[in-house]
Image (tube, helix red, strand yellow):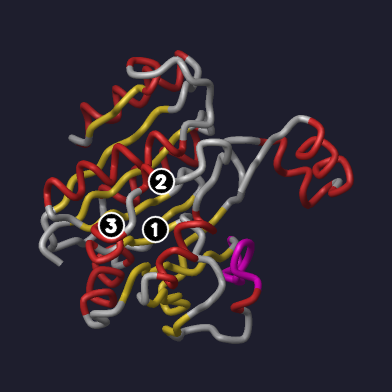
Amino acid sequence: MQKIHIITPVKDSLATTLDTIRSVMESQLDVPHTYTIYDDFSTPETARRLDEEADKWGFRVVHLSDVTNHPSPNYLLVLQTAQREALAADAALCIVESDVTLQPNTLQALCDGADARPDCGIAAAVTVDEQGVINYPYLHAKGKENQVFETKKHCSFCCSLLTPALLQRFAFTSLDPEKNWFDVTISHESLALGLRNYLFTSLPVLHRPHQSRPWKQLKYKNPLLYYWKKITKGLDKI
């Protein structure tokens, strides 16, 4: 892996975001890399704090309010921008979401794991709760702890590395603009291109789901209300 571009889309949830930033910036990563926060119309207070953290740690903040009037979520714009920049730099793209905290070795181990598998399209770290138990969205991986295995199921972008092979073969400009989230689509496209996606249960990362969009907690607390909102309001299109 020659280079890696790391990105984190942010929508408020400042406490978890700060944990994410710290864990990325303190990563033991030998590969040349950059880190960019995409601020997706957070509150002014959050935006100011992100700028302060950028000055402290030396990463880049892109405030999407400066580049688009499209309301949040703007994941499509983030992915398309990040892909364009990664391709121009001949870099891999690693997405670390703002409700995820890494281990110091996570990013380097994902790079090494992808490098060791020339057919790799996506290398994903498994997510766990505070007790270290595999949690959403990788519940299907329970019982396969401390392994690396090919998966036909989609790789969540909680903490996933998209290899140059995938970025060069699939243009994110072809993604459906009517959707909000694209991990399922991109995972399937990776397989359709003849690449393989790997889940690293040997690299657990802490995941506190949906901290940036609290209404999605209804999926666990009141699933009927969650799906009613999803359908009637056209939210959370995957």
Q: Is residue 31 above or below residue 211?
A: below
Name the mark on residue 40.
Answer: none
What percent of the width, then of the height, locates residue 173? 36, 42
Q: Amino acid at mark 2?
A: Ser
To which residue does mark 2 refer?
174
Residue located 20% across and 48% down the image: 86
Q: Secondary structure at mark 1?
A: loop
What percent of the width, then of the height, locates residue 95? 37, 51
Residue located 78% across and 43% down the image: 218
**Can you name the residue that lies furthest to the right here?**
224
Location of residue 199 by image quarter: bottom left
Q: Amino acid at mark 1?
A: Leu
Location of residue 210 by image quarter: top right
- Looking at the rendered image, the disc whose residue lies closer to the viewer, 2 or 3, is 2
Name the mark on residue 102.
Answer: 1
Residue located 12% across and 49% down the image: 89
The span picked out in magenta is 130-139
Distance between mark 2 and mark 1 Cα atoms = 31 Å
- Looking at the rendered image, the disc whose residue lies closer to the viewer, 2 or 1, is 2
To which residue does mark 3 refer?
167
Q: Amino acid at mark 3?
A: Leu
Which numbered disc flags the more N-terminal residue, 2 or 3?
3
Q: Secondary structure at mark 2?
A: helix
Name the foreground residue: 29 vs 141: 141
Left or right of 216? Residue 189 is: left
Asked whether residue 220 is drawn in magenta, I would say no
- Looking at the rendered image, the disc whose residue lies closer to the viewer, 3 or 1, is 3
